[in-house]
Image (cartoon, rainbow, N blue to C red):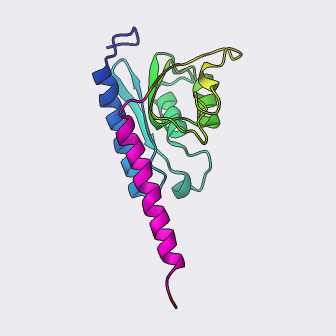
Amino acid sequence: MGFDGSITAYDDERFMSEAASEAEAAAAAGEVPVGAVIVRDGQIISRAHNMVETSRSSSAHAEMLAIEAAEKALGTKWLTGCTVYVTLEPCSMCAGAMVLARVSRLVIGTMDPKAGACGSLHNIASDDRLNHRIEITEGVLQERCSKLLRDFFRARRRSHSGENNTEI
């Protein structure tokens, strides 16, 4: 299995499942449940989940952390031949980082109509004006990835409404 097109739908689902497991770890830590894995030559070379709240860093998105780990693992700033699997469509920051790192392919679990920059609000990853474009596949394990986010935010809303309605 290489980046020559021999990646199958089964492979995409298998690696997206790994990203979803990372998203579950994020949710368990109180983070927005987004997970990412980076694959090269059929092997996961890095994995991460959102750590924004834990690290108190607005740039600690799953994709950014996975990119940094992949670059360290490979000893290069170029991620040519790599596929990023992410449970939620990347934002502008993460999409830009993927373009700069020369990621070859991006597989998205669910789109983000409010902040997505790979097809929803913007399409940084495929913008012809940039010097690198990323092949994009959408909707892999879409229901599982969407459910993680829905459940997380539903629980958060319940928690916040319960705190505001307690009698003293």
147 within the magenta span:
yes
Residue 148 spot, x, y in % from top left? 39, 48
Quadrant location of residue 40? top left
Q: Is residue 30 visible?
A: no
Q: Residue at x 50, y 88 (%)?
A: 167
Q: Tell me where the magenta segment starts and ends, as one range.
A: 139-166
Viewed as shown, does residue 167 lie left or right of 43?
right
Q: 69 or 131: which is nearer to us? A: 131
Dominant secondary-structure state across the stretch colored magenta? helix
Q: Residue at x 62, y 49 (%)?
A: 58
Residue 94 spot, x, y in % from top left? 59, 34
Viewed as shown, does residue 18 lie left or right of 103?
left
Residue 90 spot, x, y in % from top left? 55, 35
Q: Residue at x 43, y 51 (%)?
A: 150
Q: Is residue 45 above or below residue 7?
A: below
Q: Residue at x 60, y 37 (%)?
A: 91
